[in-house]
Image: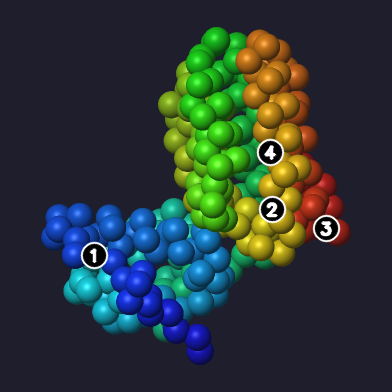
């Protein structure tokens, strides 16, 4: 069984104030998952993580519970915590939700004339990203900027609920077949249509983008509905 790698001295975290330890551990583990340093199915052993971060097991346990709630970590009574495994079925579940909701949310965002400055900034951050985790986080912020001002807070919260899982699927897919350049071109087209006020065109381009990603990442799995 592969355990959690211990950070090297050069990358060992600095002392962290007590109130922010859980958040620090949470963000660090999330970054390591999305960068591929912690791979799907890998055990996340509380004692090893606590020693690596120089904290007690309590903030580690709380961080893992939060990550389980967002879909990045799986918790088992017998196996403990592991990085969530990504397969075609999991990807289809996540992207099916996005396909059903995200294009409509974008259409409403454009129809309302909501500003899309955050989407433009996210594209710039993604282009300048130095690793897969940074690119994944920027990609996630780009998509959120397309729906966050759709005018329906519940719709936004539903899409927020699958953001981390979508980022994990993307990270795994990029590790196997780096396709960021193509996706960046698709993002630029979506944003261009949205900024032009073409709500139907932007929604259609976003739908095609979501569908094409799943086809590329998991070929032979059929069409999303």
Q: Which residue is mark 1?
A: 14
Name the residue rendered at 56%, 42% in the picture: 128
Name the residue rendered at 73%, 27% in the picture: 189
Q: Which residue is mark 2?
A: 92
Residue 124: image x %, image y %? 56, 34
Q: Residues within 10 Å of mark 3 (few under 14, many from 20)?
A: few
Instruction: Give the mark toward the camera: 1 or 3.
Output: 1
| Sequence order check, earlier mark of 4 and 2 | 2
Q: Which residue is mark 4?
A: 184
Give the Cα distance between marks 1 and 3: 43 Å
Residue 39 can be seen, yes or no: yes
Q: Which mark is residue 221?
A: none
Give the Cα distance between marks 4 and 3: 20 Å
At mark 4, the secondary structure is helix
Name the residue rendered at 75%, 19% in the picture: 201
| Sequence order check, earlier mark of 1 and 4 | 1
Mark 2 and 3 residues: CB-CB less than 8 Å, in contact?
no
Give the Cα distance between marks 4 and 2: 21 Å
| Sequence order check, earlier mark of 2 and 3 | 2
Mark 4 and 3 residues: CB-CB less than 8 Å, in contact?
no
Residue 42: image x %, image y %? 51, 77
At mark 3, the secondary structure is loop
| Sequence order check, earlier mark of 1 and 3 | 1
């Amino acid at each position: 069984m592969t355990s959690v790698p211990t950070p090297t001295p050069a990358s060992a975290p600095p002392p962290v104030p007590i109130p922010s330890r859980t958040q620090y551990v949470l963000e660090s583990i999330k970054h390591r998952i999305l960068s591929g340093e912690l791979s799907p199915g890998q055990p996340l052993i509380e004692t090893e993580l606590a020693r690596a971060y120089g904290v007690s097991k309590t903030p580690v346990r709380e961080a893992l519970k939060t990550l389980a709630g967002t879909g990045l970590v799986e918790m088992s009574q017998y196996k403990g915590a592991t990085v969530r495994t990504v397969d075609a079925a999991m990807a289809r579940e996540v992207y099916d939700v996005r396909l059903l909701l995200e294009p409509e949310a974008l259409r409403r965002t454009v129809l309302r004339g909501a500003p899309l400055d955050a989407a433009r900034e996210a594209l710039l951050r993604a282009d300048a990203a130095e690793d897969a985790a940074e690119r994944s986080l920027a990609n996630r912020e780009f998509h959120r900027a397309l729906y966050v001002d759709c005018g329906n807070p519940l719709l936004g919260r539903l899409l927020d609920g699958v953001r981390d899982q979508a980022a994990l699927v993307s990270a795994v897919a990029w590790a196997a077949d780096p396709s960021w350049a193509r996706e960046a071109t698709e993002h630029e087209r979506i944003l261009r249509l949205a900024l032009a006020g073409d709500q139907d065109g932007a929604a259609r381009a976003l739908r095609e983008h979501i569908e094409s990603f799943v086809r590329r990442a998991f070929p032979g799995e059929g069409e999303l509905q």
